[in-house]
Amino acid sequence: MSVAIEVQNLRCEFRVNAGLFAAEKRVIAVDDVTFSVPAGSVLGIVGESGCGKSTLARLILGLLKPTAGTVLVDGKRLFDLDRKARARLIQPVFQDPFASLNPRHRIKDIVALPLAAQGTVTRAEIDRRVAQILERVGLSAAMGERMPAQLSGGQRQRAAIARALVLEPRIVICDEPTSALDVSVQAQILNLLSDLRRDLGLTYLFISHNLAVVEHVASEVAVMYLGRIVERNETDALFRAPGHPYTQALLQSVLTPEPGLGVPDIGLGDAMPDPANIPPGCRFNPRCGIAVERCRSVAPTPMVRAPQGMVECHLA
């Protein structure tokens, strides 16, 4: 099976002004991340807010330049390609469908914009492909004439998906594509994304904090913590037998409808991880309930787990 996305030792740092008389802080948003995504599959990336998920997505889209490392998309070095070539290979679907659509343009013009920006497609061909992709995502020609404010949240997200697919890319980066939608609408969008992947042979990088959604759509899952992938495995294997204490805590945090259980206590405490102040050793050790002295001084190296996963933990 061919590889759609290959990330090699990717690192991204930011310099943050800490105040008038304070020295700049170095924030490591993505730290030595390596993985590959087979063509036609779905890699789900999960983790708390601030763990680096969205920064990783922007790096793979070419919207940010890495401090170190490389990104290969469809076998091509991402930053060797110009913006138009990148757009033909890989497209995003963002979290908020209202914020990502120009409120002053009609839906059909928003969907047509990527084609028009290529500068090589005739007006007649643009109109044909826009009508075709709108129908495929479940929007009528009449909806194409409307403004974004005249559509529901689910319809706007369908328009955003149509815009992403009108160039016929091989890869789509979905960054929390359903979190701004009602639960019933979420299911419709997830089913649409699944049908499009099957029919068009797409590859997804699916970023979400919703573990139930990721379990439903992903072939494999990668768990991020403070800029690193600390565990990765096939979806069924990871949800059945998580190896990293952080993954275990995330799975324990999922609310259930069973009465009387209340809010689960996952033992992570109230302190959030700080990417500007990464602890020595295992970066999860200040919040880990089973950490030993080695965890506080020696950074773990990736360990292979069956069937084809990895975990970064001394005690896994």
Image: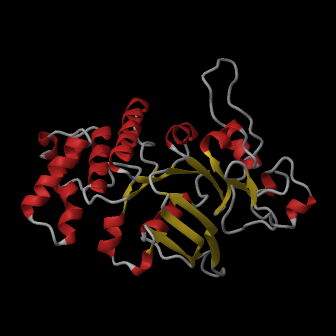
Q: Quadrant of residue 166?
A: bottom left
Asked whether residue 161 appears in the rendered view, the answer is yes
List x then y, in percent, for residue 252.
Answer: 70, 36
Q: Is residue 306 left or right of residue 81?
A: right
Residue in the foreground of this view, choosing between 56 and 272: 56
The residue located at (54%, 46%) in the rendering is: 219
State left or right for residue 209 relative to residue 107: right
176 versus 285 height, above or below: above
Residue 106 visible to the viewer: no
Q: How many marks can you see?
A: 0
**Coloring scheme of the render?**
secondary structure
Name of the residue lying farthest toward the left: 124
Q: Compare residues 42 and 280 and report the one nearer the observer.
A: 42
- In the displayed structure, 280 sits above or below 125; it is below
Residue at the outermost top position: 259
Q: Position of residue 229 (x, y in %)?
A: 65, 59
Residue 258 is left or right of residue 140, and the answer is right
Q: Is residue 250 left or right of residue 10?
A: right
**Which residue corresponds to the image point at 49% horizontal and 50% vertical from the top-left?**
42
Q: Residue at x 62, y 31 (%)?
A: 255
Quadrant location of residue 253?
A: top right
Question: Where does residue 24 sit, x and y in percent of width and height?
Answer: 63, 80
Q: State the residue at coordinates (43%, 78%).
A: 79
The spot of residue 232 in percent (x, y) is: 65, 53
Furthest-right residue in this view:
293
The answer to which of 115 and 16 lies nearer the viewer is 115
Q: Tell me where residue 198 sits by quadrant.
A: top left
